[in-house]
Amino acid sequence: MTDLPGIVVTGASGRMGQMLIRTITESPRVRLHGALERSGHDWVGRDVGAAMGGADLGITVTDDPLETFATAQAVVDFTSPAATVDFATVTAQARCVHVIGTTGLSDADIARLDAAARHAVIVRAGNMSLGVNLLTQLTKKVAAALDEDFDIEVIEAHHNQKVDAPSGTALMLGQAAADGRGVMLDAVSDRGRDGITGKRERGHIGFTAIRGGDIVGEHDVLFAAPGERIVLRHVATDRGIFARGALKAALWGIGRKPGAYDMLDVLGLSEN
């Protein structure tokens, strides 16, 4: 078992952190190498299995990434932008694969991740599922085929604990639509409508965010023209799809040359 690739999970106590840990421990292809939490968290110093309410797993939760990353093959990271950027510096030093599912990253954050990718493999995606990445490709192709008579709206729904909006997946879909039309998303993005906003701008890409209950993730891309509508949709009912996708990305990245990659590369869907 010890010759299996060792995976470190950051943000171990979070929804995705715990899902990742369960997925890793159930997988015959990888092993749990480490679990991280922020300094001062009450899980630090405890066995991660016991902290999750189960049997000991022989992995003590730590707040020190440097030592843990140094002997790991990959790190899977669904945390916060600031933490992810800091982790990227350490994964670059350790030369281990850094799989990033963190959303809400700014352009400055992404620039720092790209700098780290000169030294290590970074796989970053707003969504790790196969279905969503296929939806991204479909969105780009449909947007390219339709002219601006078709208004584009991206509608997303998530649980009431999600802190960023639009979701990383919604932005990924909006970017795909913009790419299909050959425009810059920042120039045509419409993310806020309240009050007397005036009529919809032709060619804009709108975003709507819904938050409620325990919704795992739902994304619609609506193409609406006079007399007809096209709706592309993905519904996630199990957070495990993201964990399985992240592990697939980690295994894919081991042994590859340093660089910035995404799930389209992992799934062989990239057009580059």
Image (cartoon, rainbow, N blue to C red):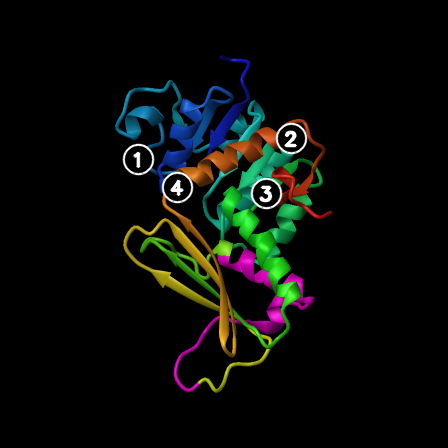
Residue annotated with mark 1:
42
Amino acid type assigned to the residue bearing label 4 in the image: Arg
The answer for how far apart the CA atoms under marks 2 and 4 are is 28 Å
* Residues marked 2 and 1 touching at CB (< 8 Å): no
* Residues marked 1 and 4 touching at CB (< 8 Å): no
The residue closer to the viewer here, 176 or 257, is 176
Residue annotated with mark 4:
239
The answer for how far apart the CA atoms under marks 3 and 4 are is 17 Å
Asked if residue 157 is among those painted magenta in the image, a careful observer would answer no
The answer for how far apart the CA atoms under marks 3 and 2 are is 20 Å
258 relative position to 32: left or right: right
| For marks 2 and 1 on the same chain, the one whose residue lies earlier in the sequence | 1
Measuring from the top left, give residue 61's x and y in whole percent. Answer: 39, 28
The answer for how far apart the CA atoms under marks 3 and 1 are is 33 Å
Give the vertical position of 12 relative to 85 (above or below): above
Q: Residues within 10 Å of mark 4 (few under 14, many from 20)?
A: some
235 relative position to 121: left or right: left
Total marks placed: 4
Q: Residues within 10 Å of mark 1 (few under 14, many from 20)?
A: few
| For marks 3 and 2 on the same chain, the one whose residue lies earlier in the sequence | 2
Q: Secondary structure at mark 1?
A: loop
Amino acid type assigned to the residue bearing label 3 in the image: Met
Residue occupying image coordinates x 55% and y 48%? 133
Identify the image quadrant of residue 181. Answer: bottom right
153 relative position to 160: left or right: right
